[in-house]
Structure formats: structure tokens, C-alpha cells
Image (cartoon, rainbow, N blue to C red):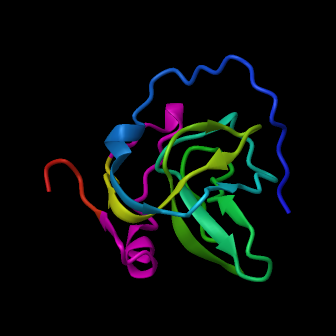
Amino acid sequence: MAIADLTNGKVQFGRNLDTLVIVDNFQSKRGGVTLDVTGFSKPYIRGGHVVIKETATGELKPMPLNSGGTAYDTLPVGHTYYGHVVNSVLTSKPFVGITRRGVVNHKVVDASIGYYDMATILADLKTELTLIDYLADNE
């Protein structure tokens, strides 16, 4: 089970595009969750980041990134897509709300600050997360 430190300090995320990514959040995972961030090397998890579920344990995790940390990797074996992080959080404090039904702008991309391109996994996301509409501002 994932465990996290509850001590708070000053938090600064720099540019924050969360409200541009999570356009509408109609339904979230009740009570939120603490993500298992084992192996996730970035200092924060941005709003809109894909969340996956390990089928054997039920653990929720941020979708892994490629070896360069610049894009989503492939879905690990034994995992399914679960939803999207609602707001940016520090990886050291991975307490998140997860959008399960709503609208996600999949075209907000800036890997340099932690918003990753969903193009390579978008078809799979649409198949598994049927209560989420993936719409860009101009669609």
C-alpha cells in the first residue's frame, strides 16, 4: 500500500496549466487516493497526468514515462487505464483527485514542465475511459 509524508512546506510548480487540461471534472474517485510513485522520477505529477491501475493489487500509479522522461511510455503489462490527475502535486506528496468522468484537453502539451503528449495512447484511453471526452479547445 502506498504511504506518503504529511509534512507540508512551501510548494511552487512554476507554470500551471491544470485548468486548461482538466476542462470539466464531473465525477472523481471519491475521497481521492495516494498514488504509488515507485519508479516515478519527476519532482511533481501534473494535472491531467494519466493514472493507471495494477490489476493484481488495485494500486493506482502515475503512467510511466519513457526513458528520457519526455513522453508517456507504453502501458505496463497487468495494468489498465484508470483516469487523470485533477491537480498538480509533488511526487513526494502524491495525494490526488482522479477524474473519472469529464472533459480532458489532450492537446495541452509541454513536456518541459510536465504536460505530456497523449497522442500515442489516445485511442486506448478513449476505449478504456469511455466517460471522459478528449477535446481540444478548437474541437
Asked whether residue 109 is drawn in magenta, I would say yes
Q: Position of residue 116 (x, y in %)?
A: 48, 47
Task: Give me the residue at 62% from left, 59% from top.
Answer: 63
Report the quarter where the N terminus lies: bottom right
Task: Give me the residue at 39% from left, 34% from top.
Answer: 17
Relative to residue 28, is residue 93 depicted above or below?
Answer: above
Q: Is residue 57 left or right of residue 122?
A: right
Asked whether residue 13 is drawn in magenta, I would say no
Q: Which residues are magenta?
A: 108-133
Q: Position of residue 26 (x, y in %)?
A: 35, 60
- Looking at this view, name the residue that lies furthest to the left: 138
Q: Nearer the viewer, residue 48 or 28?
A: 28
Q: Nearer the viewer, residue 50 or 75?
A: 50
Task: Give me the residue at 74% from left, 42% from top.
Answer: 41
Report the quarter where the C terminus lies: bottom left
Q: Position of residue 110 (x, y in %)?
A: 43, 37
Quadrant of the rendered image containing residue 11: top right
